[in-house]
Image: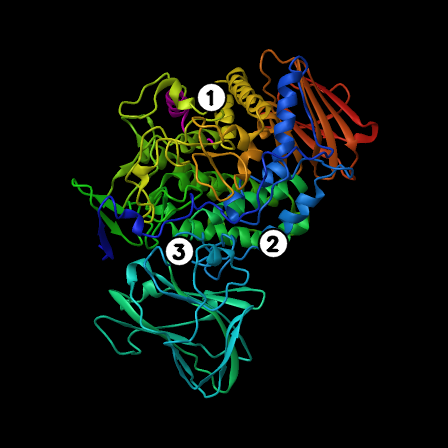
Amino acid sequence: MPLFLQETLTMQEKFLLPICLAMSILLLSASQGSAQPVPETKLPHFIVPGYETQMESMNDLFARHHNVRTRCALWDAWLPMSVLWPAVGEEHSAQKMREFYRDVFLTRFVDAQGYVTMDQHMGLAHPTGWPFPTWQQAAGAGWHFTHHGDGYARSLGIPVATTQGWKLEGIEEQGLDPMQGLKLKLTQPHAVLTTPECNAHAFAAPFIVLQWNHKRLPLDVVPVLQWTTTEFSEFSTDRQMAITPEIVHVINTLSFSSIPVHKHPQWKGSIKQLRIQWNNPAPIQITVRALHTAVDTRHPITNIMFVNGSIDYFDWTTDVDFLQKNISRMRSAMKYAVQEFSVQQNGCMLVPWVGHNGKQGFDIAADGKKTVYYGQGVGNNYWDLLPFGHKDCLGTIYLFNALNQLSNLEAAIANHPEWKIPSPDQEYSSAQLSKLAQHVKKTSTQLFWNSATKRFVACIDIDGVKHDYGYTFLNLEAIYYGFATDEQAQDILDWVDGKRIVAGDTSQGKEIYHWEFAPRATTKRNIEWYVWPWTGPETIPWGGQVQDGGAVLGFSYHDMMARLKTKGPDDAWQRMQSILSWYDKVHKQGGYREYFSKPGRGTLQGGGTAGGLGIDHEFYESALVPQTMLYGFLGFKPLPEGFAMNPQLPSSWPSLTITGIHVQDHVLSITVKKKTIEIQAEKIGKHPLRIFLPKKTNSPESKTVAKEDSLEVLIFTPENKMAIFSR
C-alpha cells in the first residue's frame, strides 16, 4: 500500500487546500457565446414535413453549435463525427474542418511507449496529460521562470521564479528572458544545477518535469536527475534517473522531459531537494523554462479516442494518403492500450498508474474532520473530478468500441491491396481485434453490472469496491456503443425513464429529467468520492455541480440514440421534442446565459464560471445533439467504400430530408420516405459511391451489384444527379 501525505482538516478549514477553479474543464478554452446571434452561413438543413416548427429549432441549434473544433484528444470521438460532414459556406464543403482534423491526427504526439498525448493547453501537471490536478494542489514543488504562453500559470497566480536559493556549479547565469525563461551558460564540463530545498511527497509527485532547450548538447550525452529525502540528505547515484530522449516531448524548440521517478525504488518519503547533472562535455547554452513535480494526469482514454477520431476522419474522406501515414500510429496506440491496461488478462481496462486506483482522495470522520490523501483519486476522462480508476468501466466501454472500429478498418485494408498498407501484426488482425472486443463485452458486462441497482458502476477500485452514483451518461453510452446486453439496455432505460425506482437515489422517477434537456448526469448525491483537491462537495447544492446531479446538453445524443436502438424511433422522437421545447423556451427568453441568470433555474458551468449545467463555451459536445438526425433517424454510416443507410423514421414523419452531406468528394441531399430513398447530388465528386442498404431494398433506377450479409450493395454514379431506391 502506498504511503500518502495526509492532512486532517476540519469542515471549516477544508478550503485551505488549493482547489481547481470551477470544475477544471478547460477554463482557458475558446468560448462559444450563447447570447450572441447564430452566425449567418450556408448550412445543411433538416426537413420533416408537418414539423416545420421543431425543425426550425433543430436547425437553429445545429447552427449555434456546429462550428466547433479542438486539438484536444478528449473530444476525438465526438467532434470529428459532428463536423466532418456538414457542407458549409459558399464553397458548400466540409473541407476546412477536414484539413484541421487531418493535421490534428497526423501531428498528435505519440510517445516512445505508444501513449497518445492529451494535447491540451500548457499546464502544471504531466505535459502529455490533463492540466489538472496541478503540482501545487499535490503539495509539490516547482519553479517557473516565465509565464509566456502559459495562461494557466498566470491564472493560478504562480510566481515567476528567480535563482535565489539555487546552487550553480560550473554555470554562468545570463538572466531571465521573459519569453523563454532562465538563460544559462554551462561553462565547465559536467555542470550541476541544484534547486532550493523543498518538501514534496513522493506518492503525489510520480514525475519530475523539466521544460528546457539547449544548443549543441551531443545526442549521446544524457543528463541525470538526483534527489535527497528526509532519510537521505546527501545526493547519491543511488537516487538518480537519466533524462533520456524517449521521455522527451518536443514542442517547437522546447523539450518537455517527464522523468518517471516513481519507477525508482528510492523515490519515496519526503523529497527535499533536486539537482541536475548535465554531463556536458564542453561549454553550451541551456534555457530552463520550468522544473516541477507532477501528478500523473494522463488519461487512459486518449489512445482510444485518437483511434476513433482517426477512423471517423478516414471513413468520411477515404483519404488513403492519410491512412498510409497514420495507420502505424493508430496500431501503436491500440497496442499500447491493450498491453498497458492488461485488457486480455482482465477482460477490461485496468489502469496501473500512480494515483489512478479508483479510491477517493479524502475520508470524512464522524466528527466532520477530513483526512486528505494527496495524489489519490486522479481522474481518467472527461469527468475529471471523479476517480474512474483501477478497473474503469467507462474506459472499458470506449475501448470496446475502438476495438470494433479498428477491426472494421483492418478488414477494409485487407480488402483493398491497392491502398498499399502493410498488414498488422497477427495478434492485432481484424479477427483478433473483434475476438478481443467480444471477450471484453462478455467479461465486463458482468463485472461492472450492479445487480441491485441494475445499472453499470463507474469503476471497481483497487480494494474491490464498486462505485455507483447512478451515472446516466455511462449507462446510456453503454447502450449506444452496443456494450450493454439487450436486457441491460432495457433495465437502464426503465431506470432513466423513472419507471424503475432505485432505492437510495436522490433523484427518482420523473425528477431524473429535472433539467429537461438531459437526464441528470448522476442520480445519487455524492459528497465523498472525488479527487483530493475537491474537498468541499457538500457545500455545493445537489445539481449545482455538473458531476453531481447536473447535466450536459451534448450527451443527450447518447440518450436519444440509446432509445432509438432499444425502444424505437417514436420514443427517441418524443425525447427530442422535449429537448427542442426546452430550447425554444430558453431562446425566447434571451438565450442560455440570460435564461439561467434567473434564480432557481440552475447554474451554467463554462467560460470560467462554476455551475451544474454544461451547455455552451467549453462544452463543445453540444454539437452532438443534432447528429441524432443523421446517424439516428436517417441511419447514415460513412464507410471507406461509400456509406450505409438503415433509416428509422418516427411513425408520424412522412419523410426526412438532410441536405449538405459531404461524404468523400460528393455533397448529397438525401430524402427518406416510407417506401423510397432518394439521393440527389448537390456537388458531384469524381468517384462512384458504394451504397449499402438493408435487404429488400429495390433499385429501379440503379443496378444491384452484390449482396453482402444483410445489406444490398449498390453503386451510385451521379451522372443524372439522382438515384431512387424503393424500400
Side of 363 relative to 686 (left or right): left
Dot 2, crowdedness within 10 Å: few (<14), some or many (≥20)? some
Q: Position of residue 604 (x, y in %)?
A: 48, 35
Region of the chain picked out in magenta, as a range: 482-496
Q: Where is residue 187 in the image (x, y as percent from the top left)?
A: 48, 87
Residue on which disc 2 sits? 106
Image quadrant for the C terminus?
Answer: top right
Image quadrant for the N terminus?
Answer: bottom left
Q: Is residue 428 above or below residue 566?
A: below
Q: Does the magenta stretch include residue 143?
A: no
Q: Which residue is drawn at 71% across and 36% down?
A: 87
Three-letter amino acid code of the residue under disc 3: Thr
As rendered, which of 175 and 513 lies closer to the eye?
175
Give the alpha-carbon distance from disc 1 to disc 2, as whole Å: 37 Å
- For marks 3 and 2, the one nearer the N-term is 2
Three-letter amino acid code of the residue under disc 2: Leu
